[in-house]
Amino acid sequence: MPTLDFERLRSIRATSPGLVSELLRQRARRPLLRESGRLFIVAADHPARGALGVGPNESAMADRYDLLERLVLAISRPGVDGVLGTPDIIEDLAILGALDDKVVVGSMNRGGLKSAVFEMDDRFTSYDVPSMVEAGIDFAKLLIRINLSDAGSAASIEATARAVDAAVAARLPIMLEPFMSEWVDGAIRNDLTTDAVVKSVAIASALGTSSAYSWLKLPVVADMERVMAATTLPTLLLGGDQMSNQEETYSSWEAALTLPGVRGLVVGRTLLYPPGGDVSAAVDTASALVHS
C-alpha cells in the first residue's frame, strides 16, 4: 500500500478547511473520454449509505485510512480513468493529491441507508449539481431504485428527474443507476432478472426533460444483449458484490464489454477488497478488459 500523509490530511481538515475546495478546483483535469472512448472508474460511495461490508466481512470498509490507501493505489494504476465518491471521500483524495488527470464522479443520493425502514427513500443528501459545478466535478451519479409496491418511489423518481434537469442545464454528464426493487423480509432486494433490468432501463432513460447528458450504470445479468438493446444511452457496467470465483466475474465483464453501447466499468468493493488481497493485480486485470 502507498505511504500517505494522513497527518497533513488531518491538519488541513482541522486548521485550513477553505483549502479543501481550492485543492479540488486546482487539480489537473482531463476530458471525460479519451481516444479509446472507454472509462474505468473505481467506486467508493458505499460507506455513505452505511454499507460497510465486503463478502463475509461486515466492517471491511469501516477503516477510512485503509480504504484511502486502497483507493489511492487503485486509481494510480494504468488504465484507471477516475473515481466515484461522496464529498468526504473525494475531498480526502484531493488533499492527498490523488485526483490529478482523473475523472471525478460525485455521488448524489445516499439517504436510503442500508437496512433502514426508510431504505427506499433515496433522497439526495450528498452532492448536488451546483456544488459539483463549483468544485469542478466531472460527472454526476445517482441511484434510482423503483419499488412498485412502495408509494414513496414516486417522490424518488420525481427528484431524480429534477436532478437530471439540473445536470442538463449545467451540461454535466449524469450517470443513473436504476433497479427494480422490492421489500423481502424487511430488507430491500434488487431484482436482477433480465426483464427487471430492461424495465428499469426504460424508466430511467426517460427521466428529465432531456436525456442528452444521461448515462446508465447497469448490473451484468443474464442475456445482457437484450439489456443493451433496450437503450441508446452510453452505459457503464456495475461491478457488483464480491464473488468467490473472481475468474467468473472477469469473464462476465469481458463478454458484456463487447456489447454495443457499453463504454466501460464502474467497480468498487470487488477490486478494492479482492480475494487474496492483491488490489493492484485485480485492478490491472479489470483495466485490461476495459481498454483492450
Image (tube, grey):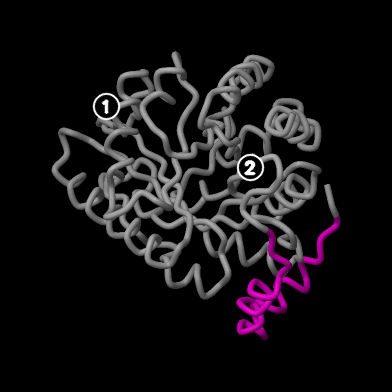
Tell me which amino acid carries mark 1. Val
Q: Residues within 10 Å of mark 1 (few under 14, many from 20)?
A: few
Q: Nearer the viewer, residue 116 or 258?
A: 258
Q: Position of residue 205 (x, y in %)?
A: 33, 41
Mark 1 residue element:
strand
Q: Which residue does the numbered mark 1 point to in the structure image?
A: 184
Above or below, 175 relative to 200 = below
Q: Nearer the viewer, residue 137 or 260?
A: 260
Tell me which amino acid carries mark 2. Leu
Which is the main secondary structure of the residues drawn in magenta? helix
Q: Is residue 226 magenta?
A: no
Name which quarter of the figure residue 257 lies in.
top right
Residue at the location (62% across, 32% down)? Answer: 270
Measure how far apart labels 1 and 2 are at the Cα level: 34 Å
Above or below, 129 relative to 17 = above
The C terminus lies in which quarter of the figure? top right
Residue at the location (50% across, 67% down)? Answer: 132
Residue at the location (43% across, 72% down)? Answer: 130
Left or right: where does residue 132 sit relative to residue 279?
left
Please report contact status of discs 1 and 2: CB closer than 8 Å, yes or no. no
